[in-house]
Amino acid sequence: MSLKSKLHDLKEKYKGKKMAPAFNALHTFLYLPNEVTHNGTHIKAADDLKRTMNTVIMALVPCLIFGMYNAGYQHYLAQGMIESANGFLGASFWTVDNLLIGAWTILPLVAVSYGVGLAVEFLFAVIKGHEVEEGYLVTGMLVPLIVPVDIPLWMLAVAVIFGVVIGKEVFGGTGMNILNPALTIRAFLFFAYPTWMSGDKVWVHGAVERDQMIAAGQSNLDAISGETILGSYAQNSSVAYDYWDMFWGLIPGSVGETSKFLIIIGALFLIFTKIGSWRIMLSTVVGALVMGLIFNGVVDAGIITDSSKFYGLMSVPFWQHLIIGSILFGAVFMATDPVTASQTNKGKWIYGFLIGFISIMIRVFNPAYPEGVFLAILLMNVFAPTIDHYVVQGNVKKRMKRLKVKAA
């Protein structure tokens, strides 16, 4: 008897019972649902929620694989075992050692993210008696891409439980949440365990552990400096990376955010498949550039001098904000979440613009943690329904005026 037949028999055996949602979810995850629409339909399409989620995952996989290589590369680079001059196309980057180090540190994050998150989803499905939704398929992939590589697994598990329960299930599950679950998880980690989410060491594998040993007198090695570009700018210090390093992703940072090239490829893929909103992506970029231009104007006018603690990030050329930090990753994979983003076309422009605008504002005015993308997206998640409400009401008023003119 085939696996499909066995699962189908289990599904029929537990039909109408408490554990039915769990068996149905397993069957649907491996195969297509058996249910079809019996009533008249007004939208005919071949895609469903699972296909939509899988499309986003396919766009994220290149960032995940590159992140594994980069995690190993940054580790050996900080150890002084390889030369940075070899660059992206050098043999020292695309080595098995780099991949093994990256896989050893990142794959456990993926396993914990999916294992704990799906366990919570199954638990709520059984308790509430509804089917398990596929919404966490993307969230489970996003979470490992936006956290430090060495974050303790128990800490990640606690954050995932919080994010799924508080960020989604309390609102009714997939399609009902007002906050992006992945960013809710990151926000929890940031406020609950700030030392593991900020600083100049957390983004390089092995740096925290090695520096702790040095501080305890257990090692005579030199400390590892894994400072990010944003951290360097916030401290008004020099940056050791050129623009191409920033673009290709040869820099410390979250696993998925470093390679802007692969993020752009993912964006084009999502736009081509009509999964991601190009309006939100473009308007977020425009908002970030506008805020960057404003800050550059403030510096050029002499209002802020190099003695100010805000000078470093204010003086960054406006376009360079796009290749440092996670503004592009947030614009492509976070802000475009169809559940928590604005639904109207005009609302998407406003929503995305404000995300980019506020992101750079937080980045500049928060030197202690010079990155504000996730905070800006969560803030606009809350205001997205309000934006759509006023857009719809504005359209209603325009139509009412036209009707009055015609009636007159």
Image: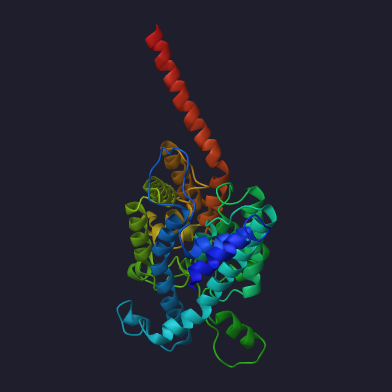
Left or right: residue 228 versus residue 10 is: left
The structure residue drawn at horizontal position 65% and vertical position 70%, both measured from the top left corner, is 155
**Residue farthest along the top direction in this orientation:** 408
Left or right: residue 297 versus residue 127 is: left
From what the image shows, is residue 353 above or below residue 159?
A: above
Quarter of the C terminus within the rendering:
top left
Nearer to the camera, 14 or 194: 14
**Colour convention of the picture:** rainbow
The structure residue drawn at horizontal position 41% and vertical position 73%, both measured from the top left corner, is 65
**Residue farthest along the left direction in this orientation:** 89
Residue 266 placed where, x, y %? 37, 60
Number of numbered labels in the structure image: 0
Residue 395 placed where, x, y %? 44, 26
The structure residue drawn at horizontal position 55% and vertical position 47%, both measured from the top left corner, is 381
Residue 362 seen by the camera: yes
Nearer to the camera, 267 or 77: 267
Left or right: residue 247 versus residue 179 is: left
Nearer to the camera, 172 or 112: 172
The structure residue drawn at horizontal position 51% and vertical position 60%, both measured from the top left corner, is 28
From what the image shows, is residue 113 above or below residue 212?
A: above
Residue 316 seen by the camera: no
Residue 407 placed where, x, y %? 40, 8
From what the image shows, is residue 403 above or below residue 370?
A: above
Residue 79 placed where, x, y %? 48, 86
